[in-house]
Image (tube, coloured by chain):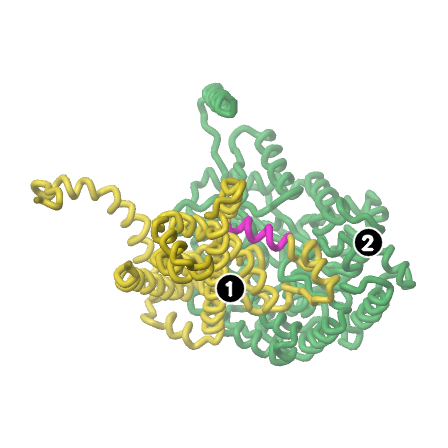
């Protein structure tokens, strides 16, 4: 039966191939790392683009997790058959941009193809992360998000807490203690993405550098500063609260996010893109709020930084193929398409026009949680400490940092010793990257 | 009498060997030599800038406490997995070898876990023992055990050992069962007539006669723990918390991930390769000769 079905499908494919016009379409390979609902978004986008014109055909391929996709792309480039478009998560940015020759800056792709492209029409808080200091766009932001604090309204009520969520870290700690006393005894609050939450976002949100040279934007000869007071104070608080059972560690990536939707952790810091999941699975009243801050840090809160991934165009392809890529990026930038992507998937709109249109429609009145990350990103004019982070080898460095943070949380090391080690080991990795990135 | 078949000339033997040799060269010697070459290089992710650095990657490796930690983790992990999976498999094989009702069903069921891919085995175990989701983890917590493999290194290590053991029992079971069945019945019957009780029969006859199988399995198990447990560790703990479950092979992956440190990662594979060659040589030289009855 299955065999028969396969033969039929094969026959169908051949028939289709034979029926297609003699002039072949130019294929554009797009490797991505999206699963679940977001995978459907990718597939649908490609289908819509393919249906919208006849010359180009975007072919999508799922390549596993973000690191897996990056690995696959690197291996493919080394073997001489890289895809045209590769989705790379934000921490891979420095790795990609240092690979001159392996990539083609998006600004060049658009210019060479003669495609209409105005870098100023994109939201600077988002494109800034993926641009050179001169403002040249290197990669095309695809799915952007920022970190927000998701909260369980029912739980706050149950613990006798005010309806407005806690704003500052001390308030969060107090609220979490009350939540624990009210029956959330396994976890008062928690975070996903350990280093994104407790190092990268924490630094930006308080206008405190994660590293020198504007967090690496001004050169590869940067050094980490993650053992400064703010980071030590925050990790000390977390370690103490972990011991008391008020904070509960949820792992390095977002595998612990289910603890929020299941109702286990009523306060949970993670990506704003968690929206789709919360909407589908949470059986309680919920919303989100900006990340907490320490009120004694002058100027806090500053602005948050983005997360998510962007689309990199790989080098060494034919001019005609680049033309197709440029057409596809124009297609993605379309205002209505951006509006739809934003309101349905929860990822941030990348153009100013799309943001304004959603704002004008009154959508955020009913869905304020979708605007939270945008308000965070645009809270203040970004400084050198809050434009983003650009460190070579950050994929591995994040693991190193997580290791040390875990050692502090389980009591093997003091927070200061752990962060000193994290800083030192991170610097070693940076020096190695600097040597190879010439 | 002529003991070996002889071919005239070299052509036919070489032709017959060619397929196997090709496979070995393409799938083993070529990648292995590339790893050796890469371990002397300092390279960016995409291989655009390359610097030949002699033994710097190796020196870096041995200067880092994390590498020794991974070495110790691998030691603990392999001893526990090998001991547990061998002894449990032997126990099951002895049980299944007896004439009990439904022996065939037991045998079949015991072999099943071998067909489970390591990553899936890992997911199965984390599903039972995840501190938030796992049914069994909740059971432990309700008994007052502070079970938290997310932060407690020993808990995480226990979990990967259990998962890796569970998966390997099948393989060991199969070989032990075959080993048991190849022990001549007459030897055991003679012992019965001499009045030896089951326990004594096992330790003085069955166990020694099984020792070639046991030693073979020991080596195979060590190789399994060294290499095939990657998927289990990746899904269960990701090497964490704080590197508590990072074994040598996992470190090869995590250091090379994202193309960050390909030279260091290659140097680690070369060391691992040397270890496996040593183990295999040990098996052939020593065990295959000595353990003979």
Does the magenta-highlighted stretch encompass residue A43? no
Which of the two residues, B125 or B207, is positioned nearer the viewer here? Answer: B207
Tag 1 or tag 2, which sits nearer the N-term? 2
- The residue singled out by tag 2 in the image is A287
Q: Quadrant of the C terminus of chain B?
A: bottom left
Residue A417 in the image, given as x and y percentages of width and height:
61, 80
Crowding near pointer 2: few (<14 within 10 Å), some, many (20+)? Answer: some
Chain bearing tag 2 is A
What residue do we see at 18% from left, 40% from top? B15
Q: Which chain is yellow?
A: B
Residue A362, disc? none
- The quarter holding residue A181 reads bottom right
Q: Quadrant of the N terminus of chain B?
A: top left
- The residue singled out by tag 1 in the image is A393
Chain bearing tag 1 is A
Q: Which residues are magenta?
A: B118-127
Q: Is residue B202 left or right of residue B239?
A: left
| Magenta residues, dominant SS class | helix
């Amino acid at each position: 039966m299955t065999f028969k079905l396969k033969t039929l499908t094969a026959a169908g494919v051949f028939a289709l191939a034979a029926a297609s016009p003699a002039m072949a379409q130019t294929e554009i390979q797009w490797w991505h790392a999206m699963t679940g609902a977001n995978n459907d978004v990718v597939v649908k986008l490609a289908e819509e683009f393919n249906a919208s014109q006849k010359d180009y055909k975007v072919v999508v391929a799922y390549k596993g997790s973000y690191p897996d996709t990056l690995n696959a792309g690197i291996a493919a480039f080394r073997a001489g058959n890289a895809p045209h478009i590769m989705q790379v998560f934000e921490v891979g940015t420095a790795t990609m941009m240092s690979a001159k020759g392996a990539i083609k800056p998006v600004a060049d792709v658009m210019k060479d193809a003669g495609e209409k492209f105005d870098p100023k029409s994109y939201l600077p808080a988002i494109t800034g992360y993926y641009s050179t200091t001169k403002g040249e766009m290197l990669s095309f932001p695809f799915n952007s998000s920022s970190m927000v604090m998701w909260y369980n309204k029912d739980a706050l009520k149950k613990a006798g807490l005010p309806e407005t969520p806690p704003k500052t870290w001390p308030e969060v700690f107090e609220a979490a203690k009350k939540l624990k006393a009210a029956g959330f005894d396994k976890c008062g609050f928690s975070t996903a993405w350990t280093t994104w939450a407790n190092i990268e976002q924490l630094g930006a949100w308080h206008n405190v550098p994660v590293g020198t040279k504007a967090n690496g934007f001004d050169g590869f000869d940067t050094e980490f500063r993650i053992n400064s007071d703010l980071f030590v104070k925050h990790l000390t608080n977390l370690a103490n609260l972990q011991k008391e059972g008020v904070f509960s560690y949820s792992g390095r990536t977002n595998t612990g996010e289910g603890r929020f939707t299941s109702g286990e952790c009523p306060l949970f810091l993670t990506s704003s893109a968690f929206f789709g999941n919360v909407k589908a699975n949470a059986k309680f009243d919920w919303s989100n709020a900006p990340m907490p801050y320490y009120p004694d840090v002058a100027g806090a809160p500053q602005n948050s930084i983005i997360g998510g991934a962007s689309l990199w165009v790989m080098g060494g392809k034919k001019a005609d193929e680049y033309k197709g890529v440029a057409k596809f990026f124009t297609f993605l930038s379309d205002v209505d398409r951006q509006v739809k992507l934003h309101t349905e998937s929860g990822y941030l709109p990348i153009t100013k026009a799309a943001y304004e249109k959603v704002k004008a429609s009154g959508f955020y009145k009913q869905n304020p949680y979708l605007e939270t990350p945008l308000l965070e990103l645009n809270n203040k004019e970004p400084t050198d400490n809050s434009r983003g982070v650009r460190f070579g080898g950050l994929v591995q460095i994040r693991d190193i940092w997580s290791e040390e943070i875990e050692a502090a949380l389980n009591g093997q090391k003091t927070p200061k010793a752990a962060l000193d080690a994290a800083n030192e080991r991170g610097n070693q990795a940076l020096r190695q990257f600097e040597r190879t990135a010439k | 009498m002529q003991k070996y078949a002889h071919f005239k000339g070299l052509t036919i033997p070489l032709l017959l060997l060619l397929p196997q040799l090709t496979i070995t060269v393409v799938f083993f010697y070529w990648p292995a030599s590339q790893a050796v070459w890469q371990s002397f290089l300092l390279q960016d992710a995409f291989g655009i800038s390359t610097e030949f650095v002699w033994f710097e990657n190796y020196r870096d490796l041995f200067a880092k406490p994390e590498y020794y930690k991974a070495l110790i983790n691998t030691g603990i992990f392999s001893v526990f997995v090998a001991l547990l999976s061998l002894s449990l498999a032997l126990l099951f094989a002895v049980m299944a070898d007896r004439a009990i009702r439904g022996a065939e069903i037991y045998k079949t069921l015991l072999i099943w876990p071998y067909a489970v891919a390591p990553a899936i085995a890992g997911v199965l175990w984390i599903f039972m023992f995840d501190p938030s989701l796992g049914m069994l983890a909740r059971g432990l917590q309700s008994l007052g055990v502070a079970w938290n493999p997310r932060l407690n290194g020993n808990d995480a290590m226990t979990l990967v050992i259990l998962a890796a053991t569970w998966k390997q029992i099948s393989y060991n079971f199969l070989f032990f069962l075959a080993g048991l069945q190849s022990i001549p019945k007459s030897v055991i019957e003679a012992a019965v007539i001499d009045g030896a009780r089951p326990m004594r029969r096992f330790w003085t006859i069955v166990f020694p006669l099984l020792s070639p199988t046991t030693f073979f399995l020991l080596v195979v198990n060590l190789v399994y723990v060294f290499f095939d447990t990657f998927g289990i560790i990746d899904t269960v703990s990701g090497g964490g918390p704080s590197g508590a479950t990072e074994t040598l092979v996992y470190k090869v992956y995590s250091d090379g991930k994202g193309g960050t440190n390909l030279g260091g990662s290659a140097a680690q594979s070369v060391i691992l390769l040397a270890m496996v060659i040593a183990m295999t040589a040990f098996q052939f030289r020593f065990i295959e000769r000595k353990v003979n009855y």
